[in-house]
Amino acid sequence: MTADERDKRQAIIDACRRMNALGINQGTSGNISLRHEDGLLVTPTSVPYDAMTPDQIVYMAMDGSHATSQKPSSEWRFHRDILKSRDDVNAVVHAHPTYCTILAIMGMDIPPVHYMIAAAGGDSIRCAPYATFGTAELSDHAVRALEGRLACLLDHHGMIAVGRSLDKAMWLAVEVETLARQYHGCLQIGKPPLLSSDEIERVRQRMAGYGMSDG
Ligand code: 13P
């Protein structure tokens, strides 16, 4: 194993632990992948992050094949399909953050309530329709909801954030949960006024020069 691969495996484990320490995930309900060579490195299924070791991270080819002794995340399909269909993406973070999941249970998109939504690539964060976890159907819904975007919600499930790097995807995952929390808070008061699509596009262009966006 090269030093680069070892570093990537460790970075995935560190990010998993950070996800739980930050409170954006619980238990082993999240999973993370990182592009590597012609395939991806993805977390194993149902291994507690504190016990996860670099050799347990699964290398998967883009056709879904992997060492038979290993068990990839039950959500390997959407990790593989997102990385396969998006050459602007190298890292995929999936978690069940509480406020994202509350909105996702309600089947709600996040509208432009705050200019930071532009960091997710556009004027909304879409909620992908429900499908059973681990299915090709869920993966198709996720890829579609991520079109032109770097994050989406998954109905009755959670959230996906992607990025050019794992650090950027993790940063965005935290930001999306913040936006979900802000939107949820606004809804307690009433119907929040929204920013226009033109304004979000202006912000997006400004962010490109500021280092906040991935675009
Ligand atoms: P793992 O299979 O990666 O442990 O994850 C469960 C999950 O997030 C289902 O959505």
Image (cartoon, rainbow, N blue to C red):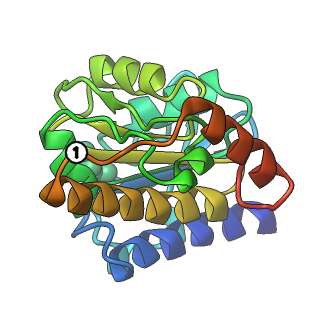
The residue that label 1 is drawn on is 191
- In the structure shown, which secondary structural element does the residue marked by tag 1 occupy? loop
Seen in the picture, residue 163 relative to 128 is either above or below; the reply is below
Q: Relative to 175, is 183 on the left or the right?
A: left
- Rendering coords of residue 80 (x, y %): 51, 31
- Rendering coords of residue 47 (x, y %): 29, 65
- Rendering coords of residue 72 (x, y %): 39, 45
Examine the image and state in which quarter residue 37 appears.
top right
Front residue of 160/49: it is 160
**Residue at (29%, 17%) from the top-left corner?**
137
**Residue at (26%, 32%) from the top-left corner?**
134
Q: Residues within 10 Å of mark 1 (few under 14, many from 20)?
A: few
Answer whether residue 42 is visible to the viewer in this image.
no
Answer whether residue 189 is visible to the viewer in this image.
yes
**Residue at (59%, 72%) from the top-left corner?**
10
The kind of residue tagged 1 is Lys
Front residue of 114/28: it is 114
Examine the image and state in which quarter residue 28 appears.
bottom left
